[in-house]
Image: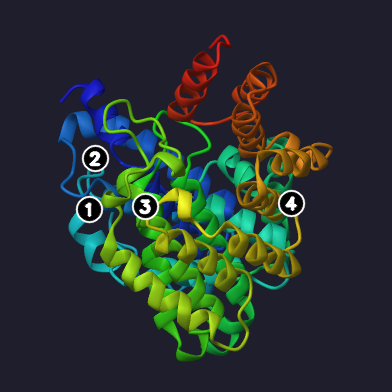
Amino acid sequence: MTSDEVRRALAEIDRDARARILATLARRFGDLDLAEDVTQEALAQALLTWPKTGVPESPEAWLKTTAKRKALDLVRRESVLAQKLARLRIEEERAPVPAGLEDPAALAASRELDTVPDDRLGLFFACCHPVMSPEDRVALTLRFVGGLSTAEVAHALLVPVATMQQRIVRAKKRIRTLGVPFGEPPRAELPARLAGVQKVVYLMYAEGFARSGGAGHVRDDLTAEAIRLARVLRDLVPELASAETTGLLALLLLTEARRPARVDAVDGRPVPLAEQDRELWDRELIAEGLVLAEAAAGSPGAGSYAIQAAIAAVHAEAVSFGVTDWDQIAVLYGMLEAHEPGPVVRLGRAVALGRARGPAVGLRLLDALAADAVLARFRPFHIARAVTLEELGEFASAAVAYRCALELPGNEAEDGFLAASLEEIGGVSR
């Protein structure tokens, strides 16, 4: 086997698998920096070993076991073996390293392959430890358990990349200093960490729904994993099946129902909601989501996720874009702002009011938000202004707004859509 073939095999190990490896090591050794280092060392070892032995039957298991052994060796060299082994109870699991690091997949499959389907959700709860700030909990979990890059986490949380890098470094240092455990917390502590886990699942789905970078517009692996975790979260502990947990699942299902119509089958570019073929929407997901959204709205403690599910339900029930009840959506956004005040919610309400009362009203409301620093670097804000200006026939100003959107980070498919929209109104695409 050639080195190029090995590199291709490693490239096929998706970020989700690498995140599982990293998460397992972090939980086992309690050190994110160590977990990152030995994961990279295992990948480097694969480049040396696999050309001689071939790609193992389970590359993920091979990498996980190899990384674990490298971590153990590093622990020994740091002269803290007794303390670490006593805490981790792993000395009896230490098997002789096969000559040439032969495929340890069978060993790994029996001990370390994460066969428990809820294991990753447990790690979400672990990373939402109360000693960290809410912002650091979410950032850390998205980065190391959700498998997002630092740039993707920054995009999800609407902060500059440099700020996010500093936040992650600070969070890792705090975890190391305080000795925060990475194991799943006691069942009694789960409710207190629920909000942080809900937000991570929500942001995972949001990144998959419209990628912050890369070629494609969506990442189906992320959206599917977020929905799976939302289902597990609702079923995990009976007392966690609250209005918000139910609302989160309803929101994701109702949004995912539009997936078949959201991307053009020819060029992969996003299709605006107004132009989507609603016959392609998944009616089974809509039916399930509507039942859950109704249950969430009628339950005590309904908050931001239940309200967002109600907004998604209004869209799902509309037989066409033109008959959408935008007044009701605007009211729901007003309710949402009481629970989750922020520029993105205000943007959603401005768009809804513009649809309900006309583009002139919408433009006035959007322009009133233009000074917000977060929205200034938020691509959907500039797209909303461009579309509204185009509807008003102000094509020169619309072109400026499209160019502003194109200057901000986004995926290549969305770039193509924006460039085509700019050309249609007589602008110049890049």
Label located before the other in sequence (4 or 1):
1
Q: In this rendering, is residue 163 above or below 115? A: above
Q: CA distance from mark 1 to mark 2?
A: 11 Å
Q: Quadrant of residue 197?
A: bottom right
Instruction: Please state which amino acid type lies under the numbered disc 3.
Output: Arg
Q: Which residue is mark 2?
A: 100
Report which residue position mark 3 lands on.
Answer: 258
Residue 402 as seen in the image, left or right of residue 48: right
The spot of residue 59 in percent (x, y) is 25, 46
Sooner in the amino-acid sequence: mark 2 or mark 4: 2
Tell me the mark number nearer the camera, choosing from 3 and 4. 3
Residue that label 1 marks: 104
Label 1 element class: loop
Give the residue type at disc 2: Gly
Depth check: give the residue in front, 374 or 122: 374
Residue position for label 4: 170
